[in-house]
Image (cartoon, coloured by chain):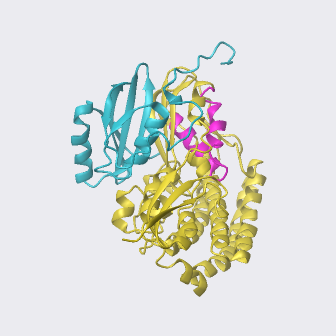
Chain colours: A cyan, B yellow
Amino acid sequence: MTMDKQTITAIEVGKLIGSVERFRNEGYRLVQIGCTKVGDLYEINYCFDKDYHLDVVRIAIPAETEVPSISGMYWNAFIYENEMHDLFGIQVRGMNIDFKGTLIRTAEKFPFSKPPVTVTKGGKP
Amino acid sequence: MTKQIIVPFGPQHPVLPEPIHIDLVLEDERVVDAIPSIGYIHRGFEKLVEKREFTEYVYIAERTCGICSFIHGATYCQGIEQIMNIDVPERAQYLRVIWSEFSRLHSHLLWLGLFADAFGFENLFMGAWKTREKVLDFMEETTGGRVIQGTSKVGGVRRDISSERLDRMTKDLDDLDREMKELTDVFLHDDSVRHRLRNVGTISRNDAYHLGAVGPTARGSGVAIDLRKSGYGAYDRLNVQVVTDSCGDCYSRCAVRAKELFTSTDLIRQAVKKIPEGPIDVKVTGAPDGEYFMRAEQPRGELVHYLKGNGSKFLVRSRIRTPTLTNIPPLIKMLQGCELADVPVIVLSIDPCISCTER
């Protein structure tokens, strides 16, 4: 089975803008930005594609760290940046369209920043 | 300077069965800006990975969408199979292609009907949905379900299609092609349809690419992105024709979907010819430890299932990036400068699936 190739590169948050700029200059498109809570940190994956090759740039930050927006280079990034703010509470600086927490209306604030549900023996949470 | 007013569009609107709200900033009848809001029905499916074992989560993944449910389930399974290095039997891979392409037929026919209804061609809507019934009948006959199929599982598929049924399928596809040809001739060649859709909601190739458009929304602007070309599943053994159009308007997006109906039946024919005999699943032991960004081509475009496991039965993360979510920024671009009366048609032209978006 042929699968698309994927590369994941971990970088520091300070190098994010420079890395994204390189992708933009080389003609990559932004596939998605996704966040994952791993312990006390938040892993943010910036995924880019060119000719079906997926290049992922990853930053790992504590909750209080502000992340620079990449919407100046990829205009469509605002949809993902607002999403990760509304679901995870990640603070993003300089978004081109900032919904200020109203893009995704959730009953509970930042639901995905809550600790995972512990599942007991027998499969009942 | 002309006075600007804001007209709220949605979340409830006759052309949209699902809720999305767009604030339309108008100068007279012209839209100068559009500000979308979603989140009315956000379900938090992704959080359920913490409560369901990775083998059970297939059912949750499938319920992300009521139209392309099979592809969601299959994509999730393929992602897990990648992490666990599971070699899926060839027959299962071909069966996934067959059901995926029938899902695409079902989705495109559904959309063509809704689109016809939106531009006021009601009997065309009925014609499209009549044809769609045949596709749903096939899904029901082979999987037991019309909307949710439940046939994909980690390690393969749950059901087989008999050789006799596969043999009969070629004739069924010929009949379906004939019916779809009659239907799509109207969409592609009728003057009133062309007049309503040409030069409406235009987005250039450059904008479509850089704003992250996917699926027929991108291909309608000449961006030839189709994840089936990356060769996941059995697609690497099939000849996938990527349909594109260059004008980037509502007519182009409609034309791409109309033509893709025939590439889907062609892919099913190829799969039926090549499908080998053999098992349809393998036993799965252990639990996923690792991560993978599984991408597949849904009827609306590129779908991403990001899956991360830590060796336990419960995944750490499932992140589903649906095509509609990424088609919202291009939609804003399409709406800027259009007439208010064109908004419903333009919104519908990206085939929005809010159920997917609000996973």
**Count the marks: how many?**
0
Q: Which of B329 and B157 lies nearest the eye of the viewer?
A: B329
Judged by its main secondary structure, the magenta piece is: helix
Instruction: From the viewer's perspective, tell me whether residue B359 is left or right of residue B306.
Output: right
- Residue A9 part of the magenta-drawn span: no
Q: Quadrant of the C terminus of chain B?
A: top right
Instruction: From the viewer's perspective, tell me whether residue A42 is left or right of residue A10.
Output: right
Residue B79 percent across, percent down from the top left:
51, 38
Q: What range is drawn magenta here?
A: B52-81
Residue at screen point 36% across, 63% down: B207
Residue A114 percent across, percent down from the top left:
52, 23
Q: Is residue B279 visible?
A: no
Q: Which of A125 and B12 lies nearest the eye of the viewer?
A: B12
Name the residue furthest top: A121
Residue at screen point 34% across, 45% down: A95
User: From the viewer's perspective, is residue B65 above or below residue B16?
Assistant: above
Residue B38 percent across, percent down from the top left:
54, 48
Residue B200 percent across, percent down from the top left:
48, 75
Q: Quadrant of residue B219?
A: bottom left
Q: Which of A107 and B140 lies nearest the eye of the viewer?
A: A107
Q: Is residue A109 visible?
A: yes
Residue at screen point 67% across, 50% down: B66
Q: Which of B97 and B312 lies nearest the eye of the viewer?
A: B312
Q: Quadrant of residue B229?
A: bottom left
Q: Quadrant of the N terminus of chain B?
A: bottom left
Residue at screen point 34% across, 27% down: A60
- Residue B69 part of the magenta-drawn span: yes
